[in-house]
Amino acid sequence: MWLSALQMSSQPDVDKNLAEIDRILTKHAIKTDKDEAHLVVLPECCLFFGGRDQQQLQLAELLCDMSPGSMQSALAALATKHQCYLLAGSIPTHSVEPGAESGAKAKRFSASSLLFSPSGELIADYQKLHLFDVNVDDNTKSYQESLYTQPGGKVTCVDIDGITIGLAICYDLRFPELFRAMRQQGAQVICLPSAFTQVTGEAHWQPLLQARAIENQVYMVAAAQQGVHANGRETYGHAMVVDPWGDCRVIDSETQLSGLVSIRYDQQLIKRVRASIPVNDHNRFTLHFN
């Protein structure tokens, strides 16, 4: 299996972002062996970024196999066109608030990662667990993601061709317990769509990704937003894939605004790393999901 992380600078325009994803996948097409799978991870907020959070709420679609929204249908079509497993970093989906009355108008949306198969089938979903309510010394200053985003309530792992894939989003990276939980569910690859700020990305992006890969002896496939966006927000880029030993393959965001970084999954590398340093067997702590 090939593992690819996509980097782009999304706009507050769904159609333009869909066209840009299609262009990048066409330009950087991976030539796989016959019947070899290809997993492509898109950044957080891949189809709408740089606008107001309230606009995300207005765009939110029902997450339902029987009635997929237009964004979900378009992403499914891209997965089919490029014959890959396509993880849409996150799109807004309708959220049910705890205690809300049936039929009540949604006040917040869920940031949902949606995984589509090469046949266009939605095979897994994950809602962002940890919300970015922080202060950063940049143009935006204060981030209050929880105003319009409802946190998720589940850990998601899915099997692709015998390889267990775990799903997380951006700020989740700072919570190692989530990654340990996915490792205990058998994860060999963990996907991290992101939109890290320029300030936090420059300081923490690569060290945190390497730490999660090394701690859990997994591949980290980290897609990224990059550049200055329509609302003035600055994102760091540097999409990368990190292997279980901590070695990285990274897009140079100083010279490349968009693109795809790829590596071939190596089951033997995971086996060697886990056999030589069996941290999962040595771990003396048990996790309980709250």
Image (tube, grey):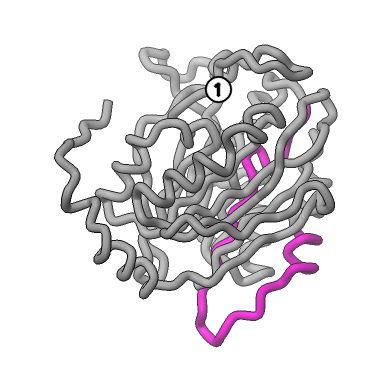
134 and 30: which is toward the camera: 134
Q: Quick check: 248 left or right of 126?
A: right
44 inside magenta stretch? yes
Of 278 and 70, which appears nearest the observer? 278
The residue lying toward the viewer, choosing from 221 and 68, is 221
Quarter of the rendering containing residue 197 = top right
The stretch in magenta equals 22-50
- Picture layout, residue 155 above or below residue 120: above
Task: Name the residue located 36 percent from the left edge and 60 percent from the top edge.
Answer: 164
Left or right of residue 216: residue 90: right
Residue drawn at the location 43% of the way across and 51% of the way down: 213
Residue 147, percent across and down?
57, 13
Residue occupying the far bottom of the picture = 34
- Name the residue furthest front: 276
According to the picture, the residue beneath numbered tag 1 turns out to be 132
Quarter holding the C terminus is top left
